[in-house]
Image (cartoon, grey):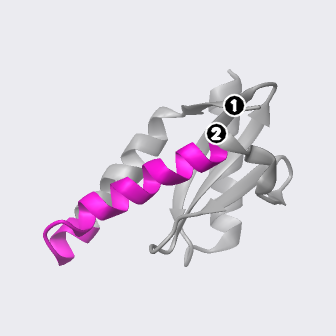
Amino acid sequence: MTHSVHFLPEVADDAIAGYRWYESKAVGLGEDFLRMFYVSARLISANPLLYPNVHREFRRCLLRRFPYALYFKIEGDEAIVIGLFHCARNPQTVKAVLRVRNKLEDS
């Protein structure tokens, strides 16, 4: 069963920041980053339970080729992407941002 994937608005900001950083390093690398972002979203849609819980109800899908991860939760037949974070970020910071964004999404 496929799930629909929804993104919090902040995830677009996360993706744009990653795109800009990679594009500044090499022309076309930002495009590759966005491609892997969308590939990961399709993988989540196809089988969200494949990805492990890493903090409470949040699951993590690692992007191929880039040190980033999509964090999402499952609600019914929807996967809600809460954040896109660099894997070198402090795990406590990631958890804190996930909690804040989750509260915003719930309100």
User: Residue 14 colored magenta?
Assistant: no
Magenta span of residues: 22-44
Mark sitting on residue 107: none
Q: What residue type is labelled 1?
A: His
* Whole-percent x, y for residue 22 in the image: 27, 70
- Residue 92 or 31: which is nearer the viewer? 31
**Label 1 element class:** loop
Image coords of residue 78 (percent x, y):
70, 28
Q: Is the magenta stretch mostly helix, strand or loop?
A: helix
Q: Does residue 107 appear left or right of residue 89 in this picture? A: right
Residue 83 percent across, percent down from the top left: 56, 49
Residue pictured at 75% horizontal, 53% vertical: 59
- Residue farthest toward the top in the current orientation of the protein: 107
Q: Are marks 2 and 1 in contact (CB under 8 Å)?
A: yes
- Give whichever of discs 2 and 1 has the lower sequence position: 1
Examine the rendered structure and indicate whether residue 50 appears above or below residue 100: below
For mark 2, what is the residue?
45
* Residue at horizontal 55 percent and vertical 78 percent from the top: 88
Given the image, on which type of amino acid does mark 2 rest? Ser
Calculate the distance from the C-alpha at mark 2 to the C-alpha at mark 1: 5 Å
Q: Is mark 2 on a helix, strand or loop?
A: helix
Q: Quadrant of residue 17?
A: bottom left
Q: Position of residue 20 (x, y in %)?
A: 24, 60
Q: Mark 1 points at which residue?
A: 3
The residue under the point 38% across, 45% down is: 13
In the foreground, 40 or 85: 40
39 part of magenta stretch: yes
At 70% across and 68% down in the image, what residue appears?
92
Compared with 17, 46 (above or below) is above
